[in-house]
Amino acid sequence: MAKAVVANDHGAVELAARVVEHLKNRGYEVSYLGTDKEESIDYPDKAEEAVMEYRKGGYDFGVLLCGTGIGISISANKMKGIRCALPETKYAATMAKEHNNANFIAFGGRIDYKEDVLDILDGYLDASFEGGRHQRRIDKMMALEGK
Ligand code: RB5
């Protein structure tokens, strides 16, 4: 069974519940790290928690959520080996997998998306990495880490 880790701050509690339910309905095993509370917490802490969990192994991808998706995705992208995409359309989410082989995907609970976030997420879930020239570019991208 494919496995995902999901984490969020207080800016995306409702969206996180929808995402977790959707992933489970699609047959994914989900490790949900919260928060399920409205109290203010710091998104870098949730990004770190999710990436550390992902690194334990057995995970296919992670979903990170905060008010905009920006802070938590930037935080995750500071950690080695992480490629966290922040798509606003299904097309971009599909490309995040096909071309960028993103291992995390982020959304904002306070963003008024033109497409349903779950449809955007489906674009990522239903896509496959194309490899080839895209692997070369990813190798170059990852070589930028620490520069
Ligand atoms: C929290 O108020 C908010 O700043 C956070 O959820 C996120 O939007 C940051 O990028």
Image (spheres, rainbow, N blue to C red):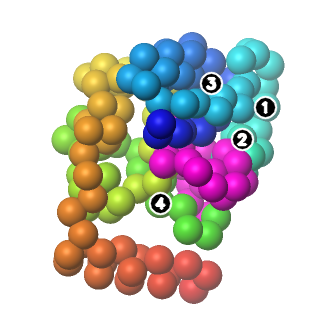
Mark 3 or 1, nearer chain start: 3
In the image, what residue type sits under mark 2?
Answer: Lys
**Which residue is label 1 attached to?**
41
Alpha carbons under labels 2 and 1: distance apart:
9 Å
In the image, what residue type sits under mark 3?
Answer: Gly
At horizontal 30% and vertical 31% (from top left) the residue drawn is 122
In the image, what residue type sits under mark 1?
Answer: Ile
Q: Is residue 31 left or right of residue 138?
A: right
**Which residue is label 3 attached to?**
11
Mark 3 or 2, nearer chain start: 3
Relative to 133, say whether 123 is above or below.
above
**Which residue is label 2 attached to?**
46
Mark 4 or 1, nearer chain start: 1
Callout 3 crowding tier (Cα within 10 Å): few <14, some 14–19, many ≥20: many
Alpha carbons under labels 4 and 3: distance apart:
22 Å
Q: For the image shown, how many numbered marks are present on the structure?
A: 4
Q: Is residue 59 left or right of residue 134?
A: right
At horizontal 62% and vertical 64% (from top left) the residue drawn is 78
Region in magenta: 50-78
Q: Secondary structure at mark 4?
A: loop
Asked if marks 4 and 1 touch (Cβ < 8 Å), the reply is no
Alpha carbons under labels 4 and 1: distance apart:
23 Å
